[in-house]
Image (cartoon, helix red, strand yellow):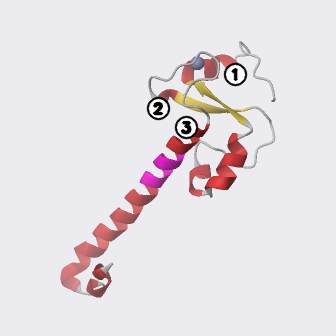
Amino acid sequence: MSNIYYFGNMKDKRKYADRAKYLINAVKKRRKNVREMAISYKGNRCEICGYRKCNEALEFHHQISKKDFGISSKGYTRSWEKVKHELDKCVLLCANCHREAHAGKHKVVDK
Ligand SMILES: [Zn+2]
């Protein structure tokens, strides 16, 4: 990180802004990676219908009502071990099956 030498220099204010942007992107990227890791940990497919066409359409459904934190948002910034612990309480479902599960069409039982 040689950019540190430019901090405080008026001329290079833009570099500081770029760095902030870079950090934001790094966090976004990490969140995406953890999501991908989580999906692959759960087998890359919907556990009900086997859908595996698009990861964006795969969601986590909690089997146990008591949850430590939400996987879908803040969970991604926590450690992978914690995420895995949480994933063990979830099933991976496609968006359709997830809605159907919430509508009571599927009996997603605790393992
Ligand atoms: Zn499905």
Name the spot of residue 74 as percent of width and height, x first. Answer: 60, 51
Give the mark toward the camera: 2 or 3. 3
In three-dimensional space, the C-alpha distance between marks 1 and 2, rounded to whole angstroms, equals 19 Å
In three-dimensional space, the C-alpha distance between marks 2 and 3, rounded to whole angstroms, equals 13 Å
User: Is the CB–ligand 1 distance for label 2 below 8 Å?
Assistant: no
Give the mark toward the camera: 1 or 2. 2
Q: Which residue is mark 3?
A: 40
- At horizontal 22% and vertical 84% (from top left) the residue drawn is 10
Nearer the N terminus, badge 1 or badge 2?
2
Q: Which residue is mark 2?
A: 56
Q: Residue furthest top?
A: 105
Please state the extent of the stretch shown in magenta in the rendering.
Answer: 29-34
Check disc 3 and give the amino acid type. Answer: Ser
Name the spot of residue 5 as percent of width and height, x first. Answer: 28, 87
Name the spot of residue 106 as percent of width and height, x first. Answer: 72, 15
Residue 102: image tag: 1
In three-dimensional space, the C-alpha distance between marks 1 and 3, rounded to whole angstroms, equals 23 Å
Check disc 1 and give the amino acid type. Answer: His
Q: Is residue 78 magenta?
A: no
Name the spot of residue 18 as percent of width and height, x first. Answer: 28, 67
- Position of residue 88 relative to residue 46, above or below, is below
